[in-house]
Image: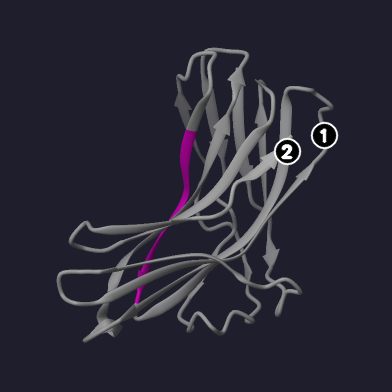
């Protein structure tokens, strides 16, 4: 059976990464006139050789940061939910289903302007593990997995993760992975930003 696993370990986000940069950004205006922006910074996927030496397994590590910003009247009173996860493109499965099993990557959310991305948090695992199953047959498919959902408050903040571990097993051909982040606020409106596609061959 095909399985996707994402696991986090204790992290230290290094200050001032050598290749720091904005990867993607999306903005929207709500009914109250607030301008809401979600950004992905410093996304890095690092494919590695699978430890099980199985030709049907793909393995990688992921690090990145998500920032949100709210401008407009009473923006300090904003509250919402910031979701983080992955889209995984599977070209062909050797079984009839894909199972997702993961523990949430280590994260820390704190109030800081998006341009101050040099603070260095150390975080524990904050959320329990979970599993998701999806039947995609033996053909190609794309699965979206929300690995964490963080309540956020105030005009801005950041969620960071480092060295989250992911594997895909039971698939043939190259696998593509991209991170996404989604900000949802009380009127159920939402905005989503997507990172670049990364090949895990």
Q: Secondary structure at mark 2?
A: strand
Q: Nearer the viewer, residue 136 or 140?
A: 140
In-image side of 22 versus 50 (left or right):
left
Instruction: Examine the structure image and report whether residue 55 is included in the region drawn in magenta.
Output: no
- Chief secondary structure of the magenta portion: strand
Q: Nearer the viewer, residue 150 or 191?
A: 191
Question: In the rendered view of the protein, which quadrant contains the C terminus?
Answer: top right
Q: Which residues are magenta?
A: 143-153
Q: Secondary structure at mark 1?
A: loop
**Label 2 – label 1 distance at C-alpha:** 8 Å
Q: Answer few, some or many: residues within 10 Å of disc 2's Cα (few below 14, many 20 plus, some between 14 and 19).
A: many
Q: Nearer the viewer, residue 75 or 138?
A: 138
Callout 2–callout 1 Cβ contact below 8 Å: yes
Placement of 199 over or under 56, stated as above or below: below
The percent position of residue 50, horizontal first and vertical second, equals 80, 34
Camera-nearest label, 2 or 1: 2
Placement of 70 over or under 48, stated as above or below: below
Question: In the rendered view of the protein, which quadrant contains the N terminus?
Answer: top right
The percent position of residue 68, horizontal first and vertical second, equals 42, 72
Residue wearing tag 1: 51
Label of residue 93 in the image = none
Placement of 91 over or under 191, stated as above or below: above
- Name which quarter of the figure residue 122 lies in: bottom right
Furthest-left residue in view?
31
Residue wearing tag 2: 59
In-image side of 128 versus 168 (left or right):
left
């Amino acid at each position: 059976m095909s399985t996707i696993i994402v696991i986090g370990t204790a992290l230290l986000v290094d200050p001032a990464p050598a290749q720091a940069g904005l990867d993607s950004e999306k903005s929207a205006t709500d009914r109250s006139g607030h301008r809401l922006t979600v950004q992905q910074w410093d996304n890095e996927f690092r494919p590695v050789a699978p430890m099980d030496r199985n030709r049907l397994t793909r393995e990688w590590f992921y690090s990145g940061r998500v920032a949100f910003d709210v401008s407009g009247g009473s923006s300090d009173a904003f509250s919402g939910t910031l979701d983080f996860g992955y889209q995984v493109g599977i070209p062909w499965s050797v079984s009839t289903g894909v199972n997702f099993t993961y523990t949430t990557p280590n994260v820390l959310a704190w109030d800081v302007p998006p341009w101050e991305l040099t603070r260095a948090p150390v975080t524990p695992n904050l959320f329990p593990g979970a599993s998701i199953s999806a039947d995609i047959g033996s053909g190609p498919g794309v699965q979206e997995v929300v690995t964490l959902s963080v309540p956020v408050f105030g005009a801005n903040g950041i969620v960071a993760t480092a060295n989250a571990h992911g594997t895909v097993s039971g698939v043939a051909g190259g696998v593509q992975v991209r991170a996404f982040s989604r900000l949802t606020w009380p009127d159920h409106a939402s905005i989503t930003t997507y990172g670049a596609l990364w090949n895990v061959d």
